[in-house]
Image (cartoon, rainbow, N blue to C red):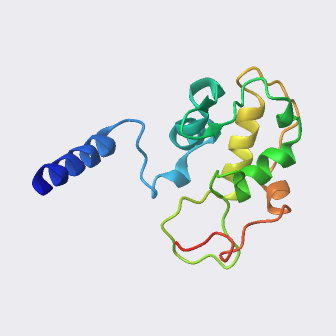
Amino acid sequence: MKGIFVMLLILASSVQADSPAFTSRAAIGSLNGEQIYDHICQGCHMPGGAGAIAAGTYPKLAANKKLVSWQFVALTVLNGRNGMPPFGQPVHHEQSRATHLTDAQIADVVNYVRSHFDNNFKTTVTSKQVTGLPHPTAELMGPQ
């Protein structure tokens, strides 16, 4: 029984690594806002920002009036919210296993979701504006 579990685990790992949707942590740094959404966000928020209710609630981003505030979206990505993990670079960042996005990438994904999925918010956010927002601290991010 143990051998079957190990084989399934290896098979699942190899399928994920060969999937076009899989991106290594090293390659995350080269992704733009749309690619970040496709590789990280849509796993919960679904394609097209449709959202889902299953083992948890994953808010829809499509036609979402809360996205009018770029700060709300950026702070959510930076620090997490209601079970969503934080993706911001923690203050006093040390090497960790978690996926972290740069302020420029957070700006890119914020601009992407605010201008797609029936959202037509024209204001764009810059990495400098994201840098000015509160970032997570290593202590708040928990054990890595």
Q: Is residue 130 above or below residue 135?
A: above
Q: Image check: 118 left or right of 98?
A: right
Q: Residue at x 61, y 34 (%)?
A: 45
Q: Is residue 124 above or below residue 97?
A: above
Q: Residue at x 38, y 35 (%)?
A: 20
Residue 59, image x and y in percent?
69, 35
Residue 109, image x and y in percent?
68, 42
56 or 24, which is in the foreground? 56
Q: Is residue 55 above or below residue 133?
A: above
138 or 38, which is in the foreground? 138
Q: How many marks?
A: 0
Q: Residue at x 82, y 36 (%)?
A: 67
58 or 2, which is in the foreground? 2
Residue 18, image x and y in percent?
29, 40
Residue 90, image x and y in percent?
67, 70
User: Could you say which quadrant of the image residue 70 lies in?
Assistant: top right
Residue at the extreme top: 118
Q: Residue at x 65, y 58 (%)?
A: 86
Q: Image check: 123 left or right of 37?
A: right
Q: Image check: 10 left or right of 20?
A: left
